[in-house]
Amino acid sequence: MITKEKLLETLKSMPDKFSVDDLMERVLLLQKIEIGMEQSEKGEGYSSEEAKKMINEWLK
């Protein structure tokens, strides 16, 4: 879940003029990063080695 603080930081980092699409793109990226961090803390992610093995399987 995104905190109000992180959302405000994202908004402040935007240029003075921007499109709603640009803002939404950044907010969605922030949300995906937050989800990934939460999953990592819970041990739900993959190690680098596991990810490499998975990618090698996909590329066969």
Image: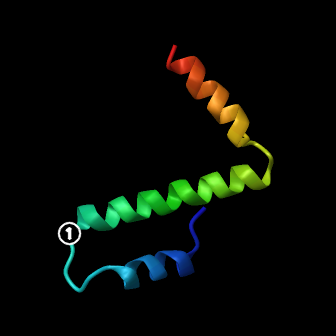
For badge 1, the amino acid type reads: Ser
Q: Residue furthest top?
A: 60
- Residue at position x 32%, y 79% in the image: 14
- Residue at position x 53%, y 19% in the image: 58
- Where residue 12 appears, x then y in whole percent? 39, 85
* Count of numbered badges drawn on the protein: 1
The quarter of the displayed image where residue 5 is located: bottom right
- Residue at position x 57%, y 27% in the image: 55
In the image shown, does 5 or 13 lie closer to the viewer? 13
Q: Residues within 10 Å of mark 1 (few under 14, many from 20)?
A: few
- Where residue 22 appears, x then y in whole percent? 27, 65
The quarter of the displayed image where residue 16 is located: bottom left
Position of 47 with respect to 15 (left or right) is right
In the image shown, does 34 or 60 lie closer to the viewer? 60
Could you say whether the residue bearing mark 1 is in a helix, strand or loop?
A: loop
Position of 12 with respect to 53 (left or right) is left
- Where residue 11 appears, x then y in whole percent? 38, 79
The quarter of the displayed image where residue 2 is located: bottom right
- Where residue 23 appears, x then y in whole percent? 32, 68
Tell me, what colour scheme is on the image?
Answer: rainbow
